[in-house]
Image: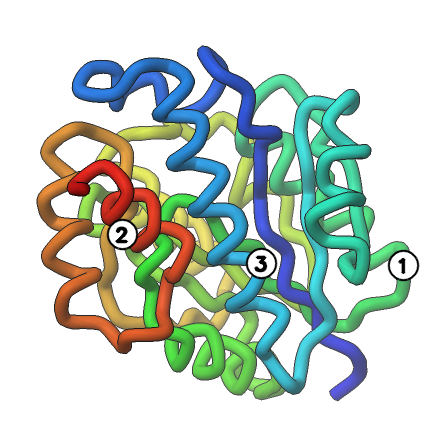
């Protein structure tokens, strides 16, 4: 297996442009700060992976300098396209054009995702008999997708942010004859209801995990 890349799909943490569904209980500035902590934790997690190259697919285009500052050792590629599906497909295309033979795209909304899930995904995408790796979110989407070849039909005309994303992706893969492997279920943080679950997850996860997100809540509890 050649080089594998793990790419964080990320937005520049600007107030009013990220995590707006968390307002309230947070202000737009606090929501942006929480998302910044998510990003820093995810960058540290990906950086610690020993068998993968780190990358960030960023948006907006003007946010490149921010990511150069917080992740100078990461490959940076701009997200391009009118919707999430187009941006994912284009990001995979850019990475494969750079010569990577396997790529994982992961979200930036799962600060407590166990690192061994990512390690498992790396092992799976390095397995020649597996074409597609998916990490299912409990809202019906996925927190990770891994490919060795770009199949645009997995992304086109998808009803994003619905419970149909994961099952529809698997259906399309099966129609194409792809071998699919799935990771354990996890949750992302999008709504106020997710915050309590995040706090509980922080309490039971390893003490050094998601340290920036931990500090965010600790500072507001003091």
In the displayed structure, 39 sits above or below 118; it is above
The residue lying at 33 percent from left, 40 percent from top is 165
| Camera-side residue of 101 and 21 | 21
Q: Specify whether 22 is left or right of 153.
A: left
Per the image, the residue denoted by label 2 is 137
How packed mark 2 is, by other alpha carbons closer than 10 Å (few <14, some 14-19, many 20 or more), is many
Q: Position of residue 78 (x, y in %)?
A: 77, 35
Q: Is residue 49 visible?
A: yes
| Camera-side residue of 165 and 202 | 202
| Camera-side residue of 186 and 192 | 192
Per the image, the residue denoted by label 3 is 43
Q: Position of residue 74 (x, y in %)?
A: 76, 58
Q: Specify whether 10 is left or right of 74.
A: left
Give yes or no for contact between labels 3 and 1 (Cβ–Cβ under 8 Å). Answer: no
Q: Specify whether 23 is left or right of 43.
A: left
Secondary structure of the residue carrying numbered label 1 = loop
The residue lying at 58 percent from left, 44 percent from top is 9
Per the image, the residue denoted by label 1 is 98
How packed mark 3 is, by other alpha carbons closer than 10 Å (few <14, some 14-19, many 20 or more), is many
């Amino acid at each position: 297996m050649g080089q594998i890349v793990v790419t964080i799909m990320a937005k520049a943490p600007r107030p009013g442009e990220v995590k707006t569904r968390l307002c309230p209980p947070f202000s737009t500035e606090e929501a942006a700060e929480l998302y910044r902590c998510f990003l820093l934790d995810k960058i540290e997690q990906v950086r610690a992976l020993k068998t993968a190259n780190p990358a960030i697919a960023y948006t907006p285009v003007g946010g490149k300098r921010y990511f150069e500052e917080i992740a100078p050792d990461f490959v940076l590629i701009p997200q391009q396209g009118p919707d999430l599906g187009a941006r994912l497909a284009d990001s995979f295309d850019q990475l494969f054009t750079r010569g990577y033979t396997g790529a994982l795209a992961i979200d930036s909304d799962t600060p407590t995702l166990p690192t061994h899930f990512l390690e498992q995904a790396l092992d799976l995408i390095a397995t020649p008999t597996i074409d597609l790796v998916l990490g299912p979110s409990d809202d019906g989407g996925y927190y990770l997708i891994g490919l060795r070849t770009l199949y645009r039909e997995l992304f086109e005309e998808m009803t994003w942010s619905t419970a149909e994303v994961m099952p529809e992706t698997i259906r399309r893969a099966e129609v194409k004859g792809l071998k699919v492997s799935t990771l354990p279920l996890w949750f992302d943080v999008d709504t106020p209801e997710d915050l309590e679950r995040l706090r509980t997850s922080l309490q039971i996860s390893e003490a050094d995990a998601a340290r920036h997100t931990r500090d965010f809540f600790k500072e507001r509890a003091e």
